[in-house]
Amino acid sequence: MNKHSKTEALDDNPEWTDAEFAQARPAAEVLPELYGQERARELMRPRGRPKLENPKLPVKLRIDPDVVDAYKAQGDGWQTRMNAALRHYAKSHGLMR
């Protein structure tokens, strides 16, 4: 394994100058020239999970350990099941539609 010192790594990837930034072009312009249209589209396609219309909100919630343990004991998806139980309670008690 070839190990480089921190200085060597910086030499391999020097900081850009203002002139280099001025010459830079967007990837959408450069990639088709380098790889062709089809490969460029593939490289530029969005990645990751699609955005949800109604994303869930992260909240900090204090729940008794025995309740969390009971849901976790059911396996993967325990948070989804806990959410469903809260939704069912809220709907059945007129807290939401």
Image (cartoon, rainbow, N blue to C red):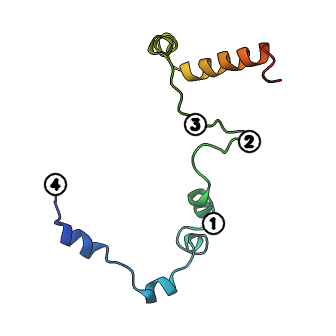
Q: Nearer the viewer, residue 56 or 34?
A: 56
In the image, residue 14 lies at what x, y percent?
31, 77
Numbered tag placed on residue 58 in the rendering: 3
Look at the picture and state if 20 lies above or below 42: below
Instruction: Give the residue number, with chain letter if any, for mark 2.
Output: 53
Residue 77 visible in this rendered orientation of the protein:
no
SS at mark 3 in the image: loop
- Precedes in sequence: disc 1 or disc 4: 4
SS at mark 4 in the image: loop
- Dot 2 amino acid type: Glu
- Precedes in sequence: disc 1 or disc 3: 1
Image quadrant holding the N terminus, namely bottom left
Q: Nearer the viewer, residue 77 or 36?
A: 77
Look at the picture and state if 10 lies above or below 42: below
- Precedes in sequence: disc 4 or disc 3: 4
Look at the picture and state if 8 lies above or below 2: below
In the image, residue 93 lies at what x, y percent?
78, 14
Which-is-in-front pick, marks 4 and 2? 2
- Precedes in sequence: disc 1 or disc 2: 1
In the image, residue 89 lies at what x, y percent?
71, 14
